[in-house]
Amino acid sequence: EAGWENHCRRIWHKKSHVCSAAITLFQNKKAMKAYQTSCRDGKHRHEIAEDELCFDPLTGNGTRWSFRFKQSAGSDWTSLDPWWSGGETRKMVFLRDGTVKQLVDNCPQQSSGHPNMRFMLRDAFFDARGGEISVPVEDLDSLAGVAPSRQIMTWRMVSQPMDLPMKPQGAYIRLNLGGRDVPTYIVHRSPTGNWGFIMESCWGIFSSFELPRRRQEHELRDSNHRDNPRMRLRRTQEGGQWFNVHGLESDSEEEQERNQVAADSSMLDDSAFSVTNCWQWREALLYNYGAMVLPEGEGATEEFDRLWSEAIRPRQVNTSPIPEETMQNYMGNVARAPTDS
């Protein structure tokens, strides 16, 4: 059992997230089961629980999300994104009251004191708008009294966004900025293998771990010198049989470091992410034409047709149905996040 505890410690300390079920098993002296559970969860569960999504501003505990725009959002947004200028990503937090705030480190050098004294919560993208509306943690209950010019971001979970399959709760996050829904964020595990969560839309990326800076250089080791994969066996905690751990995860620090360097480098390129305008062209188009609420559920396509007809009618253009292929080609030019007016 002590051997399995060591395996858990070696692999977990380099992961950005370990599921609570595995931690509970470990605390109950079931280290082998904890090891298996954590590896499988990190690879196969792509839905996020509210506890994993949210941040508690009173204790400072919870996920601090890194956010950056994709190039497809357009230069109006990327020019105001610190990541695209070689800086760190914005830090965002999801609160249980359904709001999303931008977290600003109040005292970078301070390592002691109450957690809520070390940061400030501000409106999302306050620095991109030129405004500086600060929200001290102790004043969270008085948010309703702040000037109406603030642009509030909220979140909610949805189960079947337009053009996407129905999935369990926690697979999709819908954000609303300034009273308007933006294209759905799709939840999945990080392609780096660190078990962290990624939430991405056609225009933006949230990650539950720090993203590498855009201009940071990485030294990649030559993959041609990697050893051929071999079966790795370990005894069960009773010692009566051997257990094949190949394909679960390696607890070799050298192998983990080699894999992580290569994986981190891949996060610098938008091509490492899967959600594009082709996936969400209807949602992107409706947003660009002023829709306040994006359709979801089984009737989403019919609702799209109605909203699209209403959007183009004032422009006195032909309202006959447009072939989907034609629209997708058109989206290559217009499906970009517009300037926030």
Image (cartoon, rainbow, N blue to C red):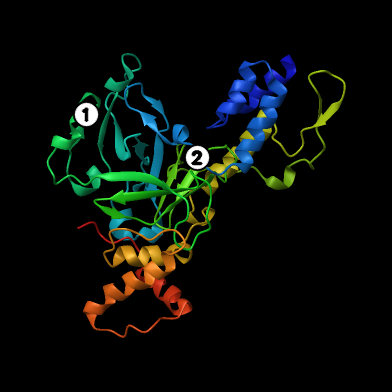
Residues under numbered marks 1 and 2 in contact, where contact means CB atoms less than 8 Å apart: no
Q: Nearer the viewer, residue 62 or 268?
A: 62
Residue for point 74% across, 39% down: 247
The amino acid on which the numbered mark 2 sits, given as a three-letter code, is Ile
Q: CA distance from mark 1 to mark 2?
A: 27 Å
Residue that mark 2 sits on? 48
Residue 251 is at least partly visible in this image: no
**Residue 143 location in percent, x, y?**
19, 34
**Residue 137 location in percent, x, y?**
25, 26
Residue for point 72% across, 21% down: 4
Note whether 119 is above or below 307 in the view shown: above
Residue that mark 1 sits on? 141
| Quadrant in which the N terminus is drawn | top right
Disc 1 element: helix
In which quadrant of the rendered view does residue 22 lie? Answer: top right
Note whether 319 is above or below 95 in the view shown: below
Q: Which mark is residue 123?
A: none
Residue for point 28% across, 50% down: 177
Q: Nearer the viewer, residue 108 or 43?
A: 43
Residue for point 31% across, 14% down: 113
| Quadrant in which the C terminus is drawn | bottom left
In which quadrant of the rendered view does residue 289 lie? Answer: bottom left
Residue 23 is at least partly visible in this image: yes
Q: Residues within 10 Å of mark 1 (few under 14, many from 20)?
A: few
Please tell me which of labels 1 and 2 falls first in the chain.
Answer: 2
Note whether 285 is above or below 182 in the view shown: below
The amino acid on which the numbered mark 1 sits, given as a three-letter code, is Asp
Disc 2 element: loop
**Residue 251 location in percent, x, y?**
69, 29
In which quadrant of the rendered view does residue 96 lie? Answer: top left
Note whether 285 is above or below 90 in the view shown: below
**Residue 81 location in percent, x, y?**
32, 48
